[in-house]
Image (tube, rainbow, N blue to C red):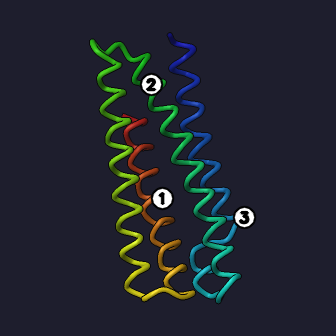
Amino acid sequence: MRCFIFSLIVAFFSINQTHAQTLKTCDTRKQCDDMSGAEAKECYGRLLKVEDDRLNNTFKLLIKKIQSTGYTDPDKIEAELRSSQRQWIKYRDSYCNYRFSTAEGGTLGGLLKLDCSCTLTRDKADHLVDDLAN
């Protein structure tokens, strides 16, 4: 049990460190904002991939934490987390589609949607990191 908790702590700090390093070495949001057209789309796509990977890795660690913490009914808690995650994905996709529609299509719409997805995914990953730390 101690070994597992230690590995969770190490993984948690690795996620945060990797995220910080990625933002230092990869495109930053400001850099993407300064680009246009296909370059900006590719830039936001890379940022979204980084945040999506961080979200997925943190989610997996949180599931492991739930299963090993000693809750009376960890399967119920895991099911609630999975359900809330599915609902959040629907919300993110719906909201970002709305953002796309405000531009009435075109390149700007695609950039707005990618920016929206990146921002919401980053924020959700941050929330899960907080849950993992508590």
Question: Is the Cβ of the residue at disc 1 closer than 8 Å to that at disc 3?
Answer: no
Residue at 30% x, 32% y: name it: 80
Mark positioned earlier in the residue sequence (1 or 3)? 3
* Amino acid type for the residue under numbered disc 3: Thr
Marks 3 and 2 in Cβ contact (< 8 Å): no
Q: Residue 30: image x %, image y %?
A: 58, 80
Mark 1 crowd level (few <14, some 14–19, many ≥20, 10 Å Cα):
some
Q: SS at mark 1?
A: helix
- Identified at 40% across, 53% down, the residue is 89
105, 34: nearer the viewer:
105
**Which quarter of the rendered picture does the C terminus lie within?**
top left
Question: What residue is shown at x 35% (from left), y 68% (from top)?
Answer: 95
Residue 112, placed above or below residue 123: below
Residue type, label 1: Arg
Q: Secondary structure at mark 2?
A: helix
Q: Which residue is mark 2?
A: 65
Mark 1 highlights which residue?
122
